[in-house]
Image (cartoon, helix red, strand yellow):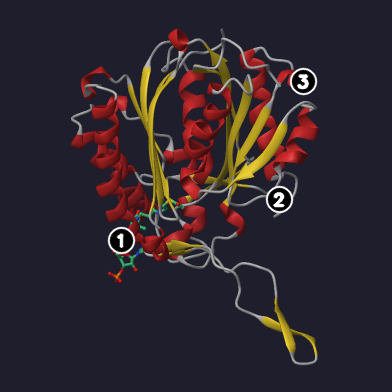
Amino acid sequence: MAETSTIGSGVALVGCGSATPSQRISNDQLGQRVDTSDAWIRSRTGISARRVIGPDETLTGLSHQAAANALTMAGWESESVDLIILATSTPDDLFGSAPQLQAILGARGAVAFDLTAACSGFLFALVTAAQFLRTGAMRRALVIGADQLSRWVNWDDRRSCVLFGDGAGAVALEATSAAQNGLLGFQLKSDGSRGDCLNLPQVQNYLSLVAGNSHQQGGFQSIQMNGQEVYKFAVREVPAILQTLLKATNTAPESLDWLLLHQANQRILDAVGDRFAIPQAKVLSNLAEYGNTSAATIPLMLDEAVQDGRIKPGQLIASSGFGAGLSWGAALVRWQGPI
Ligand code: ACO
């Protein structure tokens, strides 16, 4: 852990990485299971395929690959990491998978914990990690967004199963001077009163414990979603929170290099881009190939665009995550890359 010192007033995104499962399920393949079609799914969502973790892969394994790639790009030794936050709603271990990830990475000096905020998880974790770095309490953090929603999707419900896939993405975050700061502003929101349009509830099954007493059996139902309500929530709240963020940071939409939104539906991405008159070419999208990978979508998309050279050091990115809770947030970041 770094001593409190002159560092800590800024944070820089200095590395990224991602990993996706090898099983690829196309829309046509899904059509063999439920009454749907490639044309319906693509026209309503922009999704053509999704990746699903099979028996030879695990979520912790994918998270490890993504984090290791981010470490490599940042040029860090794993022992130098102070903090690991794994944003996931679908951990391999309900007590938390981050410590397991810390062990596999060999990041012996890091404290590691999970953070749950559904599709907003990565953004919430990024902001959380930044607070530790800004105070000077810690110097290096790995923030991972990873989800295996395929475990909790009802694969016989065509209204929801076509949307989701599995994946992992990671960012390496370093404490810097204020001049090198890459997290220029953020806004985070929750509204539990609207949470019932998207949730993943426990099974309501009680078993006898001892005479006259019972206990709840552990286990979850499948994802419950009112698609139209979630859609309306996203197209109302995401532009509103981005507007607040841009105003608070005195940023004109024209000065943004990229809009990096949670990848839920191409129609949502298009609606938000239109709201700010941001050309479609600047609205990053990889929905077609991966669908909605929940907490993984933002770092997965970031890594893809950094790797293929679209996102360059110094560029300005407005990002927004949104999803179950309900929860949503936005961040204005400047991609730094390795220092
Ligand atoms: N294939 C074919 N037909 C379908 C399918 C499908 N996969 N799914 C629904 N339909 C049918 C319905 O049964 C309905 O038929 P009916 O009129 O005969 O009853 C018709 O298509 C229209 O259904 P709607 O639900 O009105 O379709 P809509 O245009 O709203 O699209 C969708 C549904 C794609 C789910 C959209 O509402 C959406 O994207 N919402 C946002 C969901 C989302 O992003 N969720 C994740 C949030 S992030 C997180 O935290 C996990």
Q: How far apart, in angstroms, are the residues tagged by discs 1 and 3? A: 46 Å
Q: Going from the N terminus, do you reach mark 2 or mark 1 first? A: 2
Q: Is mark 1 within 8 Å of ligand 1?
A: yes
* Element type where label 3 sits in the image: helix
Question: Which amino acid, mark 1?
Answer: Gln
Q: Residue at label 1?
A: 228
Vertical position of residue 95 compared to residue 197: above or below = above
In the image shown, does 311 or 217 lie closer to the viewer? 217
Question: Which amino acid, mark 3?
Answer: Glu
Q: Quadrant of the C terminus?
A: top right
**Residue 1 left/right relative to 20:** right
Q: Quadrant of the N terminus?
A: top right
> What mark, if any, has residue 92 been given in the picture?
2
Vertical position of residue 163 compared to residue 283: above or below = below
The residue sitting at the bottom extreme is: 212
For the point 61% across and 67% down, the residue is 220
Q: Residue at label 3?
A: 79
Label 3 near label 1: C-beta < 8 Å? no
Neighbours of disc 3 within 10 Å: few (<14), some (14-19), many (20+): few
Q: Name the quadrant where ligand 1 sits.
A: bottom left
The percent position of residue 336, horizontal first and vertical second, equals 48, 13
Q: How far apart, in angstroms, are the residues tagged by discs 2 and 1? A: 30 Å
The percent position of residue 187, horizontal first and vertical second, equals 37, 36
Residue 225's image quarter?
Answer: bottom left
